[in-house]
Amino acid sequence: MHKTGDVVLGGLFQVHFFSSVPDLSFTSQPQQPTCHGVYVLGFKLAQTMAFAIDEINRNSNLLPNVTLGYTLYDNCLELGIGFRGALSLASGQEDQIVVDDTCVGNPPVVGIVGDPSSTISIAISNVLGLYRVPMVSYYATCSCLSDRQKYPSLFRTIPSDTFQVRAMIQILKHFGWTWAGLLVSNNDYGLHAARSFQSELSVSGEGCLAYTEVLPWDKDTDELRRIVDVMKTSTARVVIVFEDPSRMMHLMDEVVRQNVTGLQWIASEAWTESAVLQTPHFMPYLGGTLGITIRRGEIPGLREFLLQIHPDLHHNTSYGISLFWEFTFQCRFAPAPAGWLEGGGALCTGQEDLGNVDNEYLDISNLRPEYNVYKAVYALAYSLDDMLRCKPGRGPFSGKSCASLQSLEPWQLVYYMERVNFTTPFGDQVSFDENGDVVPIYDVTNVLWLPDGSTKIQKVGEVKRTALKGEELILDEGKIFWNFESKQPPRSVCSESCPPGTHMVRRKREPECCFDCIPCSEGKITNKSSSCPEDFWSNPQRDHCVLRKTEFLSYHDPLGICLTAISLLGTFICAVVLGIFICHRRTPIVRANNSELSFQLLMSLKLCFLCSLLFIGRPRMWTCQMRHAAFGISFVLCVSCILVKTMVVLAVFKASKPGGGASLKWFGAMQQRGTVLFLTSIQAAICTTWLVSSSPTPHKNTQYHNDKIVYECSVGSTVGFAVLLGYIGILAFLSFLIAFLVRNLPDSFNEAKLITFSMLIFCAVWVAFVPAYISSPGKLADAVEVFAILASSFGLLITLFGPKCYIILLRPEMNTKKAVMGRGIVS
């Protein structure tokens, strides 16, 4: 199709569905390829470009005094044909087209609207891009075309497949479809879409592909049968297809033949609204298809223009219209092909009424690719208009010059195309980004299969990119027709979500969406096997975390109550004994046993009993620090008193011998107090060093029981604790050794026997304590230590003060100086 003008725009459209390319044997002159199967929408798109140019020519405000013309070629969906057409447009070498009486040949075009195919656009732009010839594709969506280094003069009025893929992933995510099949065409459009889909799914983690199949270029029945078998045996109920309508028909023929139902189809923009697929033959299978479609627009006056075409009005340029006319009215212009009339075919008169035709040609209710063509033509027109409005001396080119129609270079128009910005009558703003792409926005449509057998494409949502939210999906689910008995969206997952209390284990050599569910281990919940927080543990069902039970030696449990009562009882007995000794402090039995050391010993025993209370109750920082320090100092004070007491017994015995009086000088009252203080201060220094260097701290121990937290005091430094116990042990051993050496002294000195026995009990308790403490878990370790404290304290209290209290209270006749001396109890 051609129309003359001051400036000519080129166009590439798919007016035929199929092409037959002869085999190139290179032994004879090749035959020209032939095209067949008229594509009504492709012809309508070509007419839309003609309408847009006609409208621009009638607009006095846009390109005044300039008439636009056009030259349009059919690509037959064949790379060789489309490429030849593009080169003919750019070079003007096509023969046998008479423009006017003075010029033969087609003038080169300043820009091209097309090509609709990504593969053909890539090939054309690789060549024409070298000369910076501007191309505006209305249907090529391959993401690869956004590469400005490879395609510097290509622009698009349709969003890139990158955005279309993300839109589809948004739909999958919305309905919870994590398991889908992908079918793509065997060209750049399909293969780039597949790579983009796999990449985006991997990044988003929103799902997996059950299979990815490349549809054959020709009608390869065996390959189509194999692909449909894969679809039929797969558990994926959702199928996504990037393909051209003509080849989609081959696939659907095989789907119908095998009667593969129960699939939810998601269509790319290439075939979403294709009328050739919306037939009663395919609707039982394709009904309910969700599709990504180009944004709908409105073009006032287009229908009236489409009705104006008439074969007898176009003479030499009526080839495309004649094809459309013959296809629409199922007739042939004279001379008819051989056998046409004999077979009952009719001749076309050119008087047929186009207004009575019921096909998509006159349907202007859903203008989508047509609207893209319309915007593409206007983008070129506005760029030319901006270029012609340039003021000399203010231009953007070298020397501030402007471009002119007489000496126009293609790259000069590209400069204005990159900066074009206009608003269509429908209200859409059109501009191109740095990659030559428009602002992405898609409609989401649904194929509605009506009860009368007819179909309707209805808009059910849209996907658009916003600065704040990125790709945003808006769906009206109430309007969606689901082609299933349940009338609900299908489930399409490889593995159902794991129930509470189990977690996912991926299957080997399968996508990550395929997994088995196994019970969570203790302490973990949910299908992700998330660990519970520190103070929580999983319940028996493993579906939520519960607060762990806490365990420590409490004042409220029976063991704690018993130990507390025994501790207080020991403290009370010490107080009673101390009171008895104070009341009877002038009696021989008290005076004979070094009353001051006895008082100190009773006070230290009282502290020993009381310090055991620090081991009961919830451990806190101050109790952890105080318990071992108080225990160590109290017992050292107690054992120091016993040691000094033993040494005094030994010194008194030696003083009773001739020449032994000097030994008592070293064990006077001051020396006794000083010795006790010195020995105790050593333990105080040990405790201070321990607390400063590595202080005991409260510790939550979960090693004993998973569902319990055992609160205990960590000793901090094991060495410090060992030195503390070791020092007590050394003093106790010295006391035991000295008392043992003097145990057979005359009866007057028999307190040494009591000390020996008390130290024997003391050492036995603490030797048994070490293994018992190490092997006792949790609060039992504290109970063992408290028991050792109480047992050794009671042992000292009973063995050292029991006999004396017995004499004071029950045998007062023995509490006389004569009786004491007679029994040999000597101070």
Image (cartoon, rainbow, N blue to C red):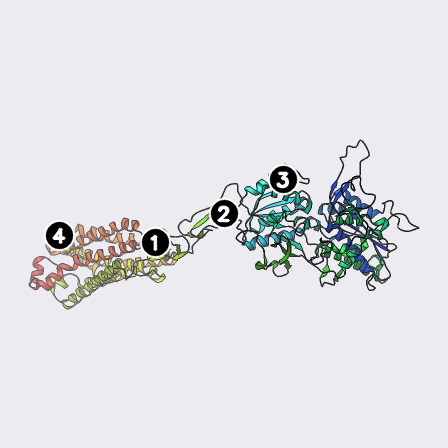
Q: Is residue 612 left or right of residue 506?
A: left
Disc 1 residue type? Gly
Tell me the CA gap for discs 1 and 2: 58 Å
**Given this view, does label 4 or label 2 mark the residue nearer the observer?**
2
Residue 584 in which image quadrant? bottom left
**Given this view, does label 1 or label 4 mark the residue nearer the observer?**
1
Look at the numbered discs 3 and 4 and tell me whether their residues touch, using CB distance below 8 Å. Answer: no
Tell me the CA gap for discs 3 and 4: 115 Å
Disc 3 residue type? Leu
Please provide percent x and percent y for residue 375: 74, 57
- Would you place residue 673 above or below residue 318 in this image? below
Answer few, some or many: residues within 10 Å of disc 2's Cα (few below 14, many 20 plus, some between 14 and 19): some
Observer-nearest of 735 and 205: 205
In the drawing, what numbered circle is on residue 495?
Answer: 2
Q: Is residue 28 left or right of residue 118?
A: right
**Given this view, does label 3 or label 4 mark the residue nearer the observer?**
3
Residue 136 showing in the rendered view = no
Tell me the CA gap for discs 3 and 1: 82 Å
- The residue singled out by tag 1 in the image is 720
- Residue in view at x 35 percent, y 61 percent: 620
In the drawing, what numbered circle is on residue 224?
Answer: 3
**Given this view, does label 2 or label 3 mark the residue nearer the observer?**
3
Answer few, some or many: residues within 10 Å of disc 4's Cα (few below 14, many 20 plus, some between 14 and 19): some
